[in-house]
Image: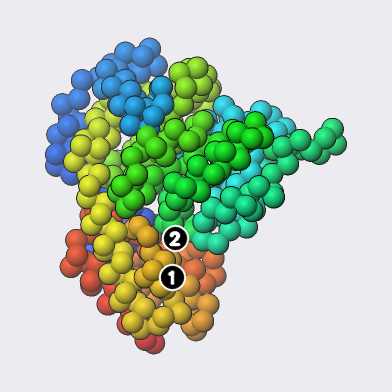
């Protein structure tokens, strides 16, 4: 989510250690070659064999019948919840969820969906809290809950992972009240690499699932929505209505396919680098970060007990050649990714630690 202060010159970007997001990754030489050699067709007509194969592959990986390639994760999410929640119906999720905090009111704007949120501890799923929060049958004068959305891993929660056990409990809760479930799995790959839980085990618990290729996997563009064949058929119509029908999109799908083949296991390196960053900063000020809270590749710095304001800390870090993001007045986020090796992470950690010593 770049702001005005995040716009940098090409020189700045080349010389900086960029921890703003894992979306800043650039295609590798192998990925570019795969894109250049992709067999393509017109996807609006359903004629692009490369994207068709990717949709089938990812649907199978996630335990669903069909998939739909989208240019962004926000679109995949919005299509997914539209399939589950009608105009004037209620979707519930936690108050830090990407779909309500960072998708600019799209659910209400495009689909007439009303949302209600519960508070969470760093985005962690508390099924008992959800059970007390939902209103499946609110009567004729209140809005009844229709669907529940979960994010795994949780972006603004600091990359936290929803356990398979808690997700199974949530599925049972939803089934008991005839509710539907959407998974914002933009970084589900990270959860899979940490836990070893098969992607299909996560995916089958939800009615619709979105995943992203342009974050830790390093593709330049692309997300995927998976669900039943009937739902994906409907989503394809809505994708076109939203202006996102694409033509020779196999060029992009080839990058995503390459990422699944070559980059998935590398996420473990990102996780180790994030832990290294957290340990270095904790050694300076334990109030800022606990390495135990760093489960994947997102490091959440809490500056509340320091003299730093987030915006000032970000500006000072930039002067030292390290780019991080401010989210709130006292919250700074750093994300490790495949374009950063261990040496770059160590250099960034030292620079950020020196600022905390001030």
Tell me the quadrant of the picture where the C terminus can be found: bottom left
- Which scheme is used to colour this image of the protein? rainbow
Residue 79 location (% of width, % of height): 52, 30
For residue 73, say whether it is visible: yes
Give the residue drawn at x 17%, y 32%: 34
Residue at 49% across, 68% down: 331
Count of labels in the image? 2
Q: Which residue is mark 2?
A: 158
Q: Are marks 2 and 1 in contact (CB under 8 Å)?
A: no
Q: Position of residue 31 (x, y in %)?
A: 18, 38
What SS does tag 2 mark? loop
Of residues 283 and 319, the one nearer the viewer is 283
| Crowd tier of the residue under label 2, counting other residues whose Cα lies within 10 Å: few below 14, some 14–19, many 20 or above | many
Q: Where in the figure is residue 129, as x and y percent of width and height?
A: 64, 53
Q: In which image quadrant can residue 356 be found?
A: bottom left
Q: Is residue 104 above or below residue 137?
A: below
Most foreground residue, 159 or 88 = 159
Q: Which mark is residue 42?
A: none
- Tell me if residue 64 comes above or below residue 279 in the rendering: above
Q: Which residue is mark 1?
A: 301
- Examine the rendered structure and indicate whether residue 352 appears above or below residue 70: below
Spatial CA span between label 2 and label 1: 9 Å
Q: Tell me what residue is drawn at x 36 percent, y 78 percent.
A: 282
Nearer-N-terminus badge (2/1): 2
């Amino acid at each position: 989510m770049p702001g005005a202060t995040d716009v940098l010159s090409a020189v700045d970007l080349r010389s900086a250690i960029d921890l703003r997001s894992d979306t800043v990754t650039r295609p590798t030489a192998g990925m570019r070659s795969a894109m250049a050699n992709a067999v393509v067709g017109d996807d609006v007509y359903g004629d692009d064999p490369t994207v068709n194969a990717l949709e089938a592959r990812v649907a199978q990986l996630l335990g669903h019948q069909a998939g739909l390639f989208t240019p962004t994760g926000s679109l995949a999410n919005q299509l997914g919840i539209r399939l589950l929640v009608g105009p004037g119906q209620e979707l519930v999720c936690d108050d830090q969820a990407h779909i309500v905090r960072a998708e600019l009111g799209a659910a209400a704007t495009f689909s007439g969906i009303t949302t209600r949120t519960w508070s969470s501890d760093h985005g962690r799923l508390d099924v008992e809290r959800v059970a007390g929060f939902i209103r499946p049958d609110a009567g004729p004068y209140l809005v009844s809950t229709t669907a529940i959305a979960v994010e795994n891993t949780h972006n603004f929660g600091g990359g936290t992972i929803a356990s398979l056990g808690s997700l199974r409990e949530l599925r049972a809760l939803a089934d008991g009240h005839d509710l539907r479930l959407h998974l914002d799995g933009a970084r589900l790959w990270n959860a899979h690499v940490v836990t070893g839980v098969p992607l299909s085990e996560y995916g089958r618990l939800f009615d619709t699932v979105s995943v992203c290729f342009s974050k830790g996997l390093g593709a330049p563009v692309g997300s995927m929505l998976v669900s039943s064949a009937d739902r994906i058929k409907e989503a394809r119509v809505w994708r076109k209505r939203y202006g996102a029908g694409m033509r020779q999109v196999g060029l992009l799908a080839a990058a995503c396919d390459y990422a699944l083949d070559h980059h998935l296991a590398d996420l473990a390196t990102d996780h180790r680098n994030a832990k290294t960053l957290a340990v270095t900063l904790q050694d300076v000020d334990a109030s800022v970060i606990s390495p135990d809270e760093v489960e994947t590749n997102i490091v959440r710095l809490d500056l509340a007990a320091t003299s730093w304001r987030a915006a000032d800390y970000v500006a000072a870090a930039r002067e030292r050649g390290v780019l991080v993001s401010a989210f709130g007045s006292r919250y700074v986020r750093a994300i490790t990714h495949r374009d950063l090796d261990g040496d770059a992470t160590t250099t960034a950690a030292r620079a950020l630690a020196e600022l905390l010593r001030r």
